[in-house]
Image (cartoon, rainbow, N blue to C red):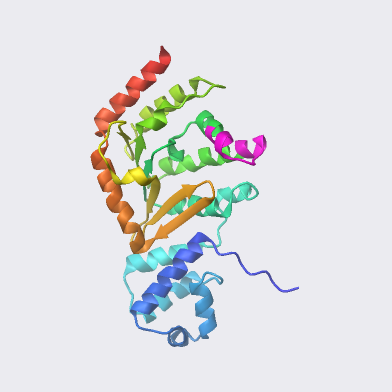
Amino acid sequence: MPNARPVPTIRRRRLGEALRRYRTEAGLTLDAAAERMGWIGPKLSRIETATAYIKPGDVAKLLSSYGIGDPEVVEALEGLARDARKQGWWQTYSGIVSPSYADYISLESDAESVREFAPLLIPGLLQTAAYARETIAANATGRSQEEAAALAEVRMARQSVLTRPGAPLELWAVIHEAALHHRFAVRPATMREQLRRLLDASEMSNVTVQLMPLDSTAHPGMVGGFTLTSFPRPMPPVALLENLSGATYVEGDEATPFAKAFDRIRATALSVEDSLARIAELEEGHRK
């Protein structure tokens, strides 16, 4: 029985794309670049297409053959090579978490910052467990109660990136005020607790929350929400677009418009101070 081909992980795909880009910039064909390493062309092709691994020790040699000696670049790509085989905590939910969702969790765990415009739901990194359970149950069509509960556990576990030692994730979320007016019939206290969670999270130095008011002027977020995930140099940012059918990733230079759009969105939104005051006002209203 033939050996099963490895399933490309998002880390291997990002590594392969970076290596392909540097080879192309060096003006080398696959065969010419492989020859410098004493390989045959198909081996390098499989590395670039993420169907084969590359040893971390070979990354620096390959980059050197492309004329790349920048320590930051070498260290970043060696890190991807080392981590490509690692199993993330989310792998224990492999029967529940879709491949595209697993890819995003991997991106999020590697990221240094996330910028998100959330027009309809509170961002997952800021949700309470009760809010997560309610919204997942409402949107996870075709899922059992047990599966929905497991997805809520995953969402809560993701939040550890905000408190990870050394370099916690920097999160900047712009949330449309409309998302704060949902009602939950089964557990009415859900939104009040969620509003309190937003206020508490905003006290963290690495978390910024703004509200897009109901009466805002026109802005790029009117066409839909998105998440922009950024990484240490030299890895390019990745934008995520989600809908009921799954997730779409936009990478590299194609993600630049999302960064520009987010800058316009946060400029249109209420200031941080006014946003927190409005959230506190809404939270107080739920107490009456």
In this orientation, does residue 158 appear?
Answer: yes
- Would residue 106 be seen by someone viewing this image from the given angle? no
User: For the magenta stretch, what is the residue range?
Assistant: 135-149
Q: Residue 180 at x, y = what percent?
A: 40, 28
For the C terminus, the image quarter is: top left
Which SS does the magenta portion mostly show? Answer: helix
Q: Nearer the viewer, residue 52 or 192?
A: 192
Q: Is residue 251 left or right of residue 99?
A: left
Q: Residue furthest right?
A: 1
Q: Quadrant of residue 65?
A: bottom left
Give the tally of numbered discs: 0
Residue at horizontal 45 percent and vertical 64 percent from the top: 14
- Answer whether residue 70 is magenta in the image: no
Residue 20: image x %, image y %? 42, 74
Q: Quadrant of the N terminus?
A: bottom right
Q: Residue at x 67, y 69 (%)?
A: 4
Q: Residue 181 appears in which quarter of the rendering? A: top left
What residue do we see at 33% from left, 20% from top? Answer: 281
In terms of depth relative to the viewer, which is nearer, 165 or 222? 222
- Is 196 above or below relative to 228? above
Between 48 and 278, which is closer to the camera in this rendering? 278
Is 90 positioned to the left or the right of 258 in the image?
Answer: right
Q: Position of residue 257 (x, y in %)?
A: 31, 56
Most foreground residue, 218 or 213:
218
Q: Residue at x 40, y 52 (%)?
A: 111
Q: Is residue 80 above or below residue 151?
A: below
Quarter where residue 171 is shown: top left
Image: 113 above or below 200: below
- Give the left or right position of residue 203, taking residue 245 as reference: left
